[in-house]
Image: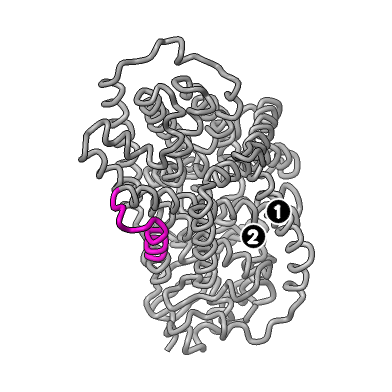
Amino acid sequence: MATRQVLPLRTAVSTSAGLASAAINFLACVEVAEYAGGSSAWIALLVAGGLIVFSASNFAELSGLYPSAAAIRVWTRKGLNDRLSLIISLVYASTVVFVIAADAFVLAQAFHAAVPAVPGWLWIVVLLGTIAWANLRGIRVSGKIQDINGAVLLMTLIVISLIILGKTSWPDPSQFFHIGGGTFQAIALGVFIYVGFEWVTPLAEEFDDARAISRGMYIALGLIAVAFGLFTMALTAIFPHIKALESTMVPQLIVGQKALGIVGFWWMVLITMTTAMTTFNGGLFTASRFVYALAREKALPRRMAHLNKHWVPANALLLLAGLSLILALGVMATGQYTVLINAGAGVEGLVYALSAWLVFSLRKREASRPRPFRALGVPWIALGVGAVFLLLGFGALLTTTAGGIPAALIFVLILTAVMTGYVWFVVPRLKSVKSSNSAVKAEPEETIK
Amino acid sequence: MLQTLEQFAEACNTNARLRQMNRDWSRTIAILPTDRPEVFWLTSKEGFIQAGQGPVNAADLQIRADHDIIVAVFSGTLSPTEPYNAGDLLVKGSQDDLMRLDIITLLIWGE
């Protein structure tokens, strides 16, 4: 039986690549290059990408097994238990807020560099506020615009990087294969470049062909590896002593300017804006629906299930936008953006490790259930790669800030503790409350006249 | 099952506010019990819902679950979110349509 509205493979690719290609990736590339020691950064990105392929195959199997917008909530509930599932889902959903906040910070830096008269924090408030307002009005960036934006970003990175590599004298070939003491951290942070590729899985219900998700993720991973790999090589070609880049918050603007002069500079400002705004839009849309679904199952306060007249879960969206804004302004005030990168890389590394375990566990628990796609190397290679992700996740979390403090680890531990306490003590009370006539309060306001 | 779906349709059609809300929502929903061979459907057109049994050529939304879960959801004894988030109720189609269906059940029976 055919469904009338289906998404094409192209949208699976652009969604996967688009959500992974956040503006914060530009700064993450600098960090990867720093830890890798310069020109050999591509090795870290390649190794991280190779490991991610295994993780993508795990997500493809899980998504085929349970194609649901509730994605990780369903898989962990089936593979673990309800409480753990809720804690993991809430922490995982928080990474959306990290990425939005980090992108808001990068966007503010780029705009402040382009128009210094306007303070960075004002850009954050205006641009995040604009996207939140558009979402509240039910205005969605259409799939086609997302497709075009993703393609333009990746093509821009490839072309500009190739121009720079063509213009610049190359370092000694041995430097391309240098393995330094920071390689492990470089790989762990390299994972961050790909983070978000799996956020296409909540769209599984909208694809007619169950294999579109797996194909889309694989193609997207290849494109991201090439585009951001070349970008990192271009960075190290411009700055052979990568420490010189430490002080800049706008490496993409420098690369654009070096390649194409002032046109390249402004083009990269535009690309940064569209990339960040796509992240805001996609992140707020997906996460607000997730919060809505949790509120409907009474795991979150029911006011989070409130829909406005445009059928948008307004309170959920405002909460997420507000948290992102607070976090972004906090990062702006402290300059500690690496905490968000490390926290995001750490949480995702742990979730990728978990995906291997879930595939293994569900192969036993749900052995007879149809699987349109089967993960690679199950059980031993997949579990081995899962163990590597576990180490990489902790490696990212243990990365210290300037004062020698593992701020990302502390941040994620506090977040997990809060979520655990919430799930253990607050959720049972929410579930036990008998609602009055909630239907009247939950209906989309002004829709029904 | 058919009786439950017909009662659901009637509950929607006798609710003036729901009819107004669904006036521009024209959809065909296929309901496929995973443990039974029968196929059922719901259609929404100009604010009115109809239920029936038999194959559907092109559905906007497909709902798959055990017979008992589908009956529980459409009779209001179970919120659709619960089996959905547990992976026991699978849907194929647009998320906007899914949310609309969720709200319809919420408006008829509450939480």
- Crowd around label 1: few <14 · some 14–19 · many ≥20 (10 Å): few
Q: Tell which of A116 and A97 is nearer to you.
A: A116
Q: Chain of mark 2?
A: B
Residue drawn at (48%, 53%) of the image: A332
Q: Circle 1 sits on which residue?
A: A414
On-image quarter of the C terminus of chain A? bottom left
Span shown in magenta: A114-130
Instruction: Using the image, determine if residue A237 lies above or below residue A286.
Output: above
Residue drawn at (62%, 51%) of the image: A92
Provide residue A76's location: percent of width, then percent of height.
69, 50
Residue A271 shows in the view: yes
* Colouring rule applied to residues: one colour
Q: Tell which of B9 and A280 is nearer to you.
A: A280
Separation of disc 2 and disc 1 at Cα? 26 Å
Provide residue A393's location: percent of width, then percent of height.
65, 37
Q: Which corner quadrant of the image does residue A142 belong to?
A: bottom left
User: Are the residues flagged by discs 2 and 1 from a single subunit?
Assistant: no
Residue drawn at (45%, 15%) of the image: A176
In this view, the mark in front (2 or 1): 1
Q: Amino acid at mark 2?
A: Asn
Q: Which mark is residue A204?
A: none
Residue B41 shows in the view: no
Q: Secondary structure at mark 1?
A: helix
Residue drawn at (38%, 54%) of the image: A277
| In this picture, residue B41 sits left or right of residue A353 | left
Q: Secondary structure at mark 2?
A: helix
Q: Circle 2 sits on which residue?
A: B85
